[in-house]
Image: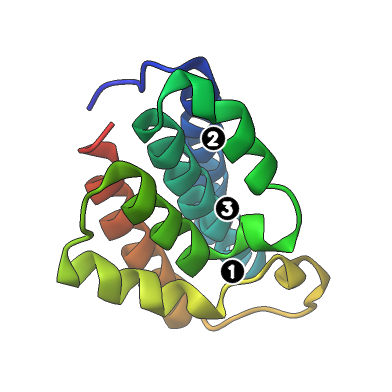
Amino acid sequence: MGLPQPLEARLYYRAGRQRFDDAQLLLRADRTTGAIYLAGYTVECFLKALVLASVPSGTRRQVLREFRGQRGHDIEWLGALYRRHAGASIPAAVTRYLARMASWSTDLRYVTGAFKSEEAEQFMETVVAIVTWADGRM
């Protein structure tokens, strides 16, 4: 699908694409914790891009300020922000995928060890479903 028009949205979109590529490389190298960590950022970036693509240009700076702090990493909050600003609902299947993401946190950066490969692959499948939906709305 297309690159979002607003510059701010494009930056998050491109960052999300890069984090997704990085996550896939880590998953192939069986670095599952890092893969999950970066895959979560993929969803965060795509949701932020969606929100920024949905708001009027005069509102973008305010929305960018709302992204600051811990809640800017909260997938559920970002989904609600998208619904509010886009005036659109999120399909039930995608809502379920977003709910699966609730366990993701930036605290994963401190986790040692590795997740099971199956768990990481399921997480990536969830991310792919969300990204595919979000990409179709850009």
Density class for disc 2 (Cα within 10 Å; few <14, some 14-19, many ≥20) is some
CA separation in Å, label 1 and label 2: 17 Å
- The picture places residue 95, in percent across and down from the top left corner, at 28, 70
Q: Name the residue under label 1.
A: 32
- The picture places residue 51, in percent across and down from the top left corner, at 42, 41
Q: Name the residue under label 3.
A: 41
Q: What element carries label 1?
A: helix
CA separation in Å, label 3 and label 1: 14 Å
Q: In the rendered structure, which amino acid carries the disc numbered 3?
A: Tyr
Nearer the N terminus, badge 3 or badge 2?
Answer: 2
Q: In the rendered structure, which amino acid carries the disc numbered 2?
A: Gln
Can you say which quadrant of the picture contains the C terminus? top left
Where residue 109 sits, quadrant-wise, is: bottom right
**Residue closest to the eye, 25 or 43:** 43
Q: Is mark 2 on a helix, strand or loop?
A: helix
Density class for disc 3 (Cα within 10 Å; few <14, some 14-19, many ≥20) is many
In the displayed structure image, the side of residue 110 where residue 48 appears, left or right: left
Q: What element carries label 3?
A: helix
Q: In the rendered structure, which amino acid carries the disc numbered 1?
A: Thr
